Amino acid sequence: MATYEAIKYSFGGSLVTALQSPNMADGSVTNTEFQFINSLTSNAQTQLNTKFGTAGGTFTGDVTLNDNIHLYLGTGGATDLDLYMDGSNGYIKNSTGNLNINADSILVRDDGNTRNMFNAVSTGAFNAYHNNTLRFSTTSGGADVAGTLTATTFSGSGASLTSLNASNISSGTIPNARYGTPTFSAANLTSIPAANLTGQYAALDGSNINSLNAAALSGVAGSINGTNINNLDAAALATGTVPAARLPGSLGKVLQVVSTNNGTVFQTNSSSYVDVSGQSVTITPSATSSKVLVTLDYTTDTQNDNTVYSVQLVRGSTAIGNGADGNQMLHMNANEYDTGGLTFLDSPSTTSATTYKLQVKTGNHTGPNGGTIVFNRSQDTNTNNRWTSNITVQEIGS
């Protein structure tokens, strides 16, 4: 028979709801009963395992950690790898060993994925960017910098540095050994103050040296090639003589004059040309292009009627200046006198000594012979009234 107590508390609990676990004074809930919670229709662990199993698995949805909630990786907790967000900044903190990132290529870009910041390739270059512009890149032989490299201090070898600006050298002294042995070409030097030139100089090539002020030159200069020195002031020539060949040909100036005056009486009745004694002069032209102007005058007389004569100018042994009729003769009667002369511009084309002379021959107006012609005498043999003959040659620069 049941007791009162047994009857008092013996009732079905299927309709009891909202029991508070603190009010359970004794007894226990079996594992089978505990694993079915609320509306779960199967074992709770089984359903949890479908989300992330205790033995590992794959998340099929997002995982969100609130600010300042740390994700610790490693058994050391906060002393190992720590990932978290403090509300403003994100952190990857590693307090043990190295933080290794293993990849054949690493590229870091901005949060909008539009600008490169840096990238590295295991078999190639490391590249760094500024505002998406490549500025630094490693190479197999060193590194390339695009733009200006600024540093507080540089060290190492400057053997390959080029385009150095000497005006940027602000301290220190360049050793003499660094100057080396200079080699200069004066080919394009201009406006050199002659007052700064002293001592004795080696041979200079003055091909392009111009506008030198000779008054400012001092000391003794070495041999100078003046082939192309120009703007020289002829008024400054104090000594020496300018060779005739150096004078401009277009000037047509008289370069030299040679003249002879003859008062010696000469007579002949030769029917062929003979030299008139004393009527010759020799000149040596200074250039083959020169002209020679020959001027001569003479006086003649005869004591024979019907005397005729002819004269000709000769260079060396060659008659020059003759017309078409080279044998035309002048007629004279006894005790007559005559004066004659000629002017001829010759082109000897030589720089050798050249002799010009007067030749004469006689005859009569009816035949080739007859009469005697006399030079440098008055109408008779009275020598108190004697005339003279002259021959002058002038070299003309052409």
Image (cartoon, rainbow, N blue to C red):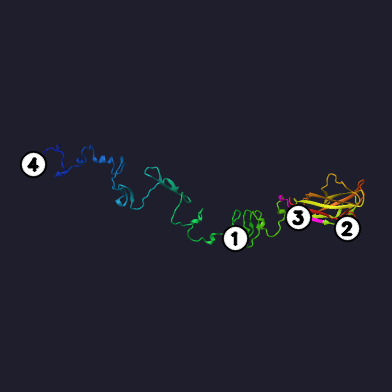
Q: Dot 1 corresponds to which residue?
A: 195
Distance from the alpha carbon under mark 1 to that under mark 2? 70 Å
- Residue at 54% in and 61% down: 177
Q: Which residues are magenta?
A: 250-260
Give residue 51's position: percent from left, percent from top: 28, 40
Mark identifier at residue 256: 3
| Mark 1 Cα-neighbour bin, 10 Å: few <14, some 14–19, many ≥20 | few
Name the quadrant of the N terminus: top left
| Nearer-N-terminus badge (3/1) | 1
Which of the two residues, 241 or 152, is positioned nearer the viewer here? 241
Secondary structure at badge 3 equals: strand
Which of the two residues, 257 or 213, is positioned nearer the viewer here? 257
Instruction: Work out whether residue 158 can be spotted.
Output: no
| Nearer-N-terminus badge (2/4) | 4
Which of the two residues, 331 or 379, is positioned nearer the viewer here? 379
Which of the two residues, 168 or 63, is positioned nearer the viewer here? 168
Question: Which amino acid type is shown beneath numbered disc 2?
Answer: Thr
Question: Which amino acid type is shown beneath numbered disc 1?
Answer: Ala
| Nearer-N-terminus badge (3/4) | 4
Q: Is residue 342 left or right of residue 216?
A: right
| Mark 4 Cα-neighbour bin, 10 Å: few <14, some 14–19, many ≥20 | few
Question: Which amino acid type is shown beneath numbered disc 3?
Answer: Gln
Do the CB atoms of the residues marked 3 and 4 lie less than 8 Å apart?
A: no
Q: Name the dominant secondary structure of the magenta segment.
A: strand
Residue 258 is covered by the magenta coloring: yes
Give residue 382's position: percent from left, percent from top: 89, 57
Give residue 191's position: percent from left, percent from top: 59, 55
Secondary structure at badge 2 equals: helix
Mark identifier at residue 5: 4
| Nearer-N-terminus badge (1/2) | 1
